[in-house]
Amino acid sequence: MDFKLTEDQIMLRDTVRRIAAENFAPKAAEFDEKETFPQENFRILSENGLLGIQVPEEYGGAGAGMLSLILTVEEVARACAGTSVILTTQALASDPILLGGTEEQKKTYLYRLASGECMGACAITEPGAGSDVSGMKTAAKKVDGGYLLNGSKIFITNGGVSEIITVLAYTDKEKGNKGISMLIVEKGDKGFTVGKEEHKMGIHASDTRELIFEDVFLPENRLLGGPGNGFKILMQTFNYTRPAVGAQALGIAQGALDAAISYAKERVQFGKSLASFQGMQWMIAEMALAVETARTMVYRAASTIDAEPASPDIPRIASMAKWYASDTAMKVTTDAVQIFGGYGYIREYPVERMMRDAKITQIYEGTNQVQRIIIANQILK
Ligand SMILES: Cc1cc2nc3c(=O)[nH]c(=O)nc-3n(C[C@H](O)[C@H](O)[C@H](O)COP(=O)(O)OP(=O)(O)OC[C@H]3O[C@@H](n4cnc5c(N)ncnc54)[C@H](O)[C@@H]3O)c2cc1C
């Protein structure tokens, strides 16, 4: 891959690859089996300064840019997709503060997230509001000195292990999307509770929760970007976080391709290795083509964000990267299971987990149908 990475980016990628291979890969199956949150992996990511790689240094991050975040997510996902969710969710929680926060909010909340002091979550989805956030019921009513938050959220990644949560709520329902705001909730806020944990098809190492808000008082300084700016902040956040989900998908696909190549070389049938059959060779070549194409798209989206953060192309290329890379992850992991034959269907081998982990990348951060809507809107307008 001769994409123009700087020396620093190559060093970062190789360092994260080593950390992930030594620490995350050996325990990926165990975390998947036990469905437990990998607290020790959070600690390793934090100690290595990887939780705010794209966040400017003055706010606790590494100031290394989006492409560096993408390289980090890809390498971690290649070893353990569940652990890579910690990185993508930290970005999803941090970016609304980075994009819409005041200096004080950035120095307080963003700093804690980017420096790896604690984990963050971002709460948008509700039972009646998935692809269409306007169906949301959660509301923040203006009261003396702040807001009173009421409502509930579902499917919130790391909701049970986070201390800082960026929450989407109506401050004025009559105004539609212009009446939506983004607020910061802290774990200890009175009236905030964590509800049931979901049991999922894949990414078992991530924590997926219901969050409940009952008369949670939030002072004025918890509102991000002023009242009514929440929808705009969310859309800008997604422009930045969709390539990161693309990188997660890319890492899963690369991990499955690596496993399929090794297996095809070792497994002997009809007196020859699987890798010697043309049918297998073509399948592997097609998988490699899709992975390389996905990598080009994801790196291009990230590089554009780094070079031209206000480029009007970003929503389209961010959506394209997320859509293509996640479809690639699903196809490549399914083909990897096929190359393993019956063994691919058995939990002892990693490709079965990778195929389950890949599926979510087609669903969250906007389903791939939603990505098509965004791309078509931008092309046709
Ligand atoms: C493991 C997991 C983690 C998650 N983490 C988070 C999180 O951290 N924070 C958060 O806020 N949310 C999170 N989510 C929620 C996730 O973002 C939503 O599930 C997703 O946006 C889809 O919403 P929905 O499930 O309500 O599906 P729906 O919106 O009901 O969609 C159902 C189907 O209809 C399709 N569809 C909907 N509208 C259209 C249309 N106009 N045209 C064509 N097709 C359409 C969709 O593509 C989909 O295939 C998570 C979900 C899961 C499963």
Image (tube, helix red, strand yellow):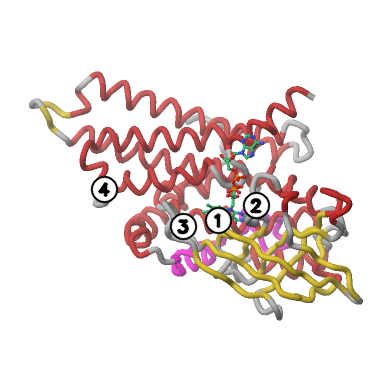
Q: Mark 2–mark 3 contact, CB under 8 Å?
A: no
Residue type at mark 1: give it. Answer: Leu
Q: Does the magenta stretch include residue 281?
A: no
Residue 149, given in percent of the width and then of the height, sits at 77, 70
The residue depicted at 42 percent of the width and 52 percent of the height is 202
How far apart marks 2 and 1 lie (CA) works out to 11 Å
Nearest to the eye among marks 4 and 1: give it: 4
Q: Name the residue under label 3.
A: 83
Left or right: 220, with 236 as reference point: right
Which residue was labeled with disc 4? Answer: 349
According to the picture, the residue beneath numbered tag 1 turns out to be 87
* Residue 8 makes an appearance in the image: no
Query: Are there few (<14), some (14-19), or many (20+) residues within 10 Å of tag 3?
Result: many
Residue at the disc numbered 2: 54
Which residue range is magenta in the image? 37-63
- Which kind of residue does numbered mark 3 sit on? Thr
Above or below residue 372? Residue 188 is below
Q: Nearer the viewer, mark 4 or mark 3?
A: 4
The answer to the question of whether label 1 and label 3 lie on touching residues, with beta carbons closer than 8 A, is yes
